[in-house]
Amino acid sequence: MNATISILVGSLRRASIARTIATATVNMFPAGVDARIVEIGHLPLYNFDYDDPGVTDVDTPAEYTQFRQVIAASDGVLFVTPENNRTIPACLKNAVDIGSKPNGNAAWRGTPAGIISHSVGRMGGYSSQKNLRLALSYFDMPMPGQPEVFLGQSPTLLAEDGTFSNETTYAFVHDYVARFAELVEKHR
């Protein structure tokens, strides 16, 4: 399996729990999968003027073009996100919007997606994951079915070295990553 997986982290903080979880998943992918975090913090806020053919005095930011190319070249995208105010963080929604254009040529279209959500509370980012699934459903992105990954009380699940602190959580997340990798291979 020679596949490329882009991992998008829904938190810009370097020491965020979402980034720690994303980093822990990188080594869970099977051999032959190149999984790497794609940074989204540098992306300018989405503005349709950049993609509107009727607006000729505004250039599309180079960051948009590069991001769209990376996503379009990916065999799959894994989203790792916290929940902010019962939805996805603004940086992640911005990335979704940027990848959705230009119309008719969305970088996301048909690309397999996986989602791992977390929260410091018991719900594990349920609302953020459901909102992200809703946004991605427009792009016909196949996703693994049950069980979904909602990591509740996430600070208690991680050791100081950035690994999962118990075997049960590690095995659960590892199983999801393996199922996601199988889905990616099936759709290549």
Image (tube, rainbow, N blue to C red):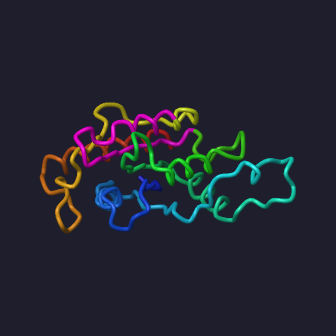
- The residue sitting at 27% across, 38% down in the picture is 123
Q: Is residue 72 left or right of residue 21?
A: right
The reply to whether residue 9 is in sight is yes
Residue 2, given in percent of the width and then of the height, sits at 45, 55
Residue 108 lies in the magenta stretch:
no
Task: Determine which quarter of the picture holds residue 113.
Answer: top left
The reply to whether residue 34 is in sight is no
Residue 121, given in percent of the width and then of the height, sits at 24, 44
Vertical order, 141 against 10 (above or below): above
- The residue sitting at 48% across, 61% down in the picture is 38
Query: Which residue is nearer to you in this view: 95 or 181?
Result: 95
Task: Determine which quarter of the picture holds residue 86.
Answer: top left
Query: Which residue is nearer to you in this view: 85 or 69?
Result: 85
The span shown in magenta is 110-134
Vertical order, 1 against 112 (above or below): below
- The residue sitting at 48% across, 41% down in the picture is 112
Which residue is at the far front? 85
Q: Is residue 177 left or right of residue 56?
A: left
The number of numbered discs placed on residues in the rendered structure image is 0
Q: Is residue 116 left or right of residue 54?
A: left
Residue 66, given in percent of the width and then of the height, sits at 63, 62
Residue 120 lies in the magenta stretch:
yes
Query: Which residue is nearer to you in this view: 129 or 176?
Result: 129
- The residue sitting at 59% across, 61% down in the picture is 43
Residue 106, given in percent of the width and then of the height, sits at 65, 44
Query: Which residue is nearer to you in this view: 68 or 119?
Result: 119
